[in-house]
Image (cartoon, helix red, strand yellow):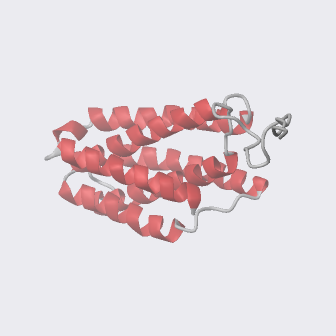
Amino acid sequence: MAEPQATAGPPLSAPAWRPGDARADAASMLRVDQAGEYGATRIYAGQLAVLGDHHPAAALVSRMAAQERRHLAHFDAMLAERGVRPTVLQPFWRVAGHALGAATALMSPQAAMACTAAVEDEIDAHYSEQLEALGDSDPPLSAAIAEFQADEREHRDAAIEAGAEDSFGYPLLYSAIRAGCRVAIELSKRI
């Protein structure tokens, strides 16, 4: 009996890519980045709604909010020019972001800063992962991410300097907010 002959090339069910190949999904990255910047604008809006214009922390929060609005406008434009739809969860992020910002500001100005430190640490890590995955495959997206990552790091550092780590229950609050950010990131990538 003749033995079956080996065929050249991969079997039909094998993927066209191999493990380890770079496969950056720029559309998913853009969708989640736009959602994250939108969420950040809502967090700061919630904080400012509680803190008001005259609280000492309001000037810092307002400055960070303005940068987040600039980031959001840039990602909104990139979504439109590339034909990428935003996450369908945006109405949820609108409410959740504002509620998170308001709740932490109601706890204390230090808790509001703890919220900022946690969110910005998670975004910093997320942007680093994206930059590594993108490599040199999408220079315009990489440039935006790198620029905005620098701003997010400044926000984190400013929040820590403004007393984030002095908030009551900082380790728990910080960890819970970072975990929530990770869930939001994963959901916004897909939905």
Report x, y in % for residue 190. 57, 59
In the foreground, 98 or 182: 182
134 is higher (above) or lower (below) than 11:
above
Q: Residue at x 49, y 35 (%)?
A: 151
**Quadrant where the N terminus lies?**
top right
Report x, y in % for residue 144. 64, 38
Give the residue furthest to the left. 168
Residue 94 makes an appearance in the image: yes
Viewed as shown, does residue 131 lie left or right of 39?
right
In the foreground, 150 or 136: 136
* The image quarter in which residue 54 lies: bottom left
Viewed as shown, does residue 23 lie left or right of 103?
right
Viewed as shown, does residue 143 lie left or right of 52?
right
172 is higher (above) or lower (below) than 51:
above
Q: Residue at x 58, y 37 (%)?
A: 130
Q: Residue at x 60, y 37 (%)?
A: 145
